[in-house]
Image (cartoon, rainbow, N blue to C red):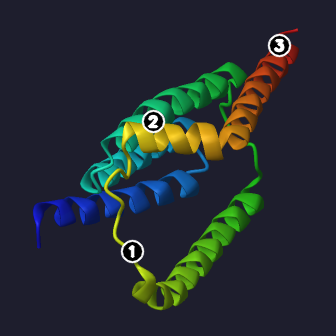
Amino acid sequence: MSAPAVFFYLAGAAAVLSALGMVLNVRNTVAAAMNLVVTMIALGVIYVTLDAHLVAALQIMVYAGAIVVVFLFVVMLLNLRRDAFPRPRQRLTKVAAVVIAFGIAAAFLHIIPTALPTVREIPADFGSYRAVGLALYRLFVLPFEVTSLLLLAAIIGAVVLAKRRLD
């Protein structure tokens, strides 16, 4: 097995484990955010093994950097010290997360054998600056702008909620 394949599988395992840690850690939101950072960095490593260096850099800068910092800022601004959900609801959340995870895994295991014959080779410019720019500003302009507006609305909502608590 080649070195990139080993890194790919190790980063994949790290991403899955840290994502599970993020979902199942309902007691400490800061620890869940740190698990999210590990997940995003592991995904960046996966992109590097696929020779998509720009996408890897964007993954780490935008998601592991900016989005998680904004998330932590909102958590600390709202001063969440204890669980927002009562004990029975936490158990229900964990059970639902496990059921959904098994459902997604079963769907992937069902889809993968049928998709294998149609696997195509990765295009030569996959992950390049030009390919990402063309896709982002030609095909996905509307979703990109809608996402930025949703993030802005979330930040404004967090500030309004925090201001109400201070008054």
Q: Can you tell which of label 2 and label 1 is closer to the viewer?
A: 1
Residue pictured at 36% horizontal, 36% vertical:
57
Circle 1 — which element?
Answer: loop
Rendering coords of residue 161 (x, y %): 83, 22
| Residue 163 - label | 3
Residue pictured at 58% horizontal, 83% vertical:
107
Q: Can you tell which of label 3 and label 1 is closer to the viewer?
A: 1
Q: Are marks 3 and 1 in contact (CB under 8 Å)?
A: no
Quarter of the figure with the C terminus: top right
**Picture quadrant of residue 71:** top right
Please tell me which of labels 2 and 3 falls first in the chain. 2
In front of the other: 70 or 62: 62
Distance between mark 2 and mark 1 Cα atoms: 30 Å
The amino acid type found where label 1 is placed reads Arg
Residue 105 in sight: yes
The amino acid type found where label 3 is placed reads Lys
| Residue 64 - label | 2
> In the displayed structure, does residue 154 sit left or right of residue 164?
left
**Picture quadrant of residue 102:** bottom right
